[in-house]
Image (cartoon, rainbow, N blue to C red):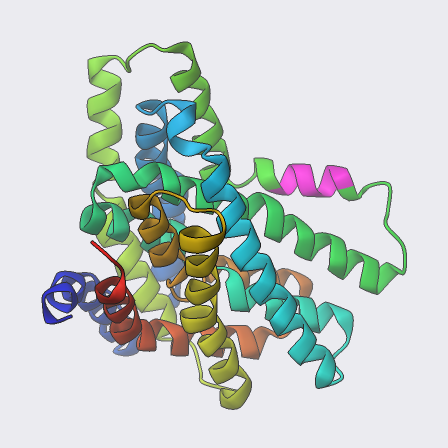
Amino acid sequence: MLAIFLQTLPFFAVIGLGFLAGKRGFFPPEATAWLTRFVFYFALSALIFGFAANMSLAEIFDLRAAGAYLWGTSLVYVIVLAVAFLRRLPLDQASMEAQVGVIGNTGFLGVPMLVLLLGTQAAGTIILVLVIDLIVFSSLLTVIVTLARQGRVSWDLPRVIAMGLLRNPMIVATAAGLGWAATGWALPGPVDAFMVLLGAAATPGALFAIGASLATSRAERPLVAGWLTVSKLLLHPLAVGVAAFFLFRTDPFTAKVLVAAAALPVAGNVYILAQHFNLAVARVSASILISTLFSVVTLPLILTLLPG
């Protein structure tokens, strides 16, 4: 475990640096917002586009991998939802907690860190996880919250979901990259070099932005946030691992990538959704903070326990 911990330590050290910069006021919230925007719309999008454009569709859309991830994630989603119902939470709050329990920071942390740790051959599976999280579960949350608040499914809902997906640069970058990959043409040299250069800023920029954003988070509702952290960091990778290794029998490397992706801390975009719907904001913020802190230990441990 020590060797893997030392490999992941530089990534979490950059997060820690961003946290200190934000906590000391050297990097104010306004600066964090602009850095996040740069990473989200430019650097990370270039990184994802570059990966997708240089892959075949078969390298990304592995049906066994998709089935394993969907099965494991759906199981934990239902568990967290059931626990919320036992606490007599309304449907919209329960669905937000379920979202926290299964959606990891795949874009800002998983793509840059796991690709560097596990190799570029892991990129296709990581992008697959990102697409499932954004398209399936973010859309599911929108449907549930709308249904809970309006009592019916609006005819305008498909348009709202479609526009939300089109405004997400990671989805657009993935779709554009896959569209280029489908042509079978190699990216022109200057374009590929441009994507590599801009994408290289994604890793340090995303990690620093995560840390700086955590500086303004507070550990409110710690018991609930603790349960959601256990769900995300332990139950989710366990369920995905059982599905990948035993039920769907994906190849061992793909299974390892799926479990590593499932072991990531809670995603920052869940907080954006919580703010958008004005729903369980304190719980979500605390869960992101606590899960990120504990993932310093749990992620290397899970990577150590995985075969290979």
Q: Quadrant of the N terminus?
A: bottom left
- The answer to whether residue 50 is left or right of residue 169 is left
Residue 280 position by quadrant = bottom right
Which stretch did the figure color magenta?
Answer: 158-164
Residue 36 makes an appearance in the image? no
Viewer-side residue, 70 vs 222:
70
Q: Inspect the magenta stretch and tell me whether residue 34 lies in it.
A: no
**Residue 52 placed where, x, y %?**
36, 29
**Residue 264 placed where, x, y %?**
37, 62
**Residue 43 placed where, x, y %?**
31, 40
Eyeballing the image, is 191 above or below 8? Answer: above
- The answer to whether residue 33 is left or right of residue 231 is left
Q: Tell me the residue at 50%/59% (across/down).
A: 103
Magenta segment's dominant SS is helix
Q: Tell me the residue at 56%/66% (across/down).
A: 76
Residue 92 makes an appearance in the image? yes
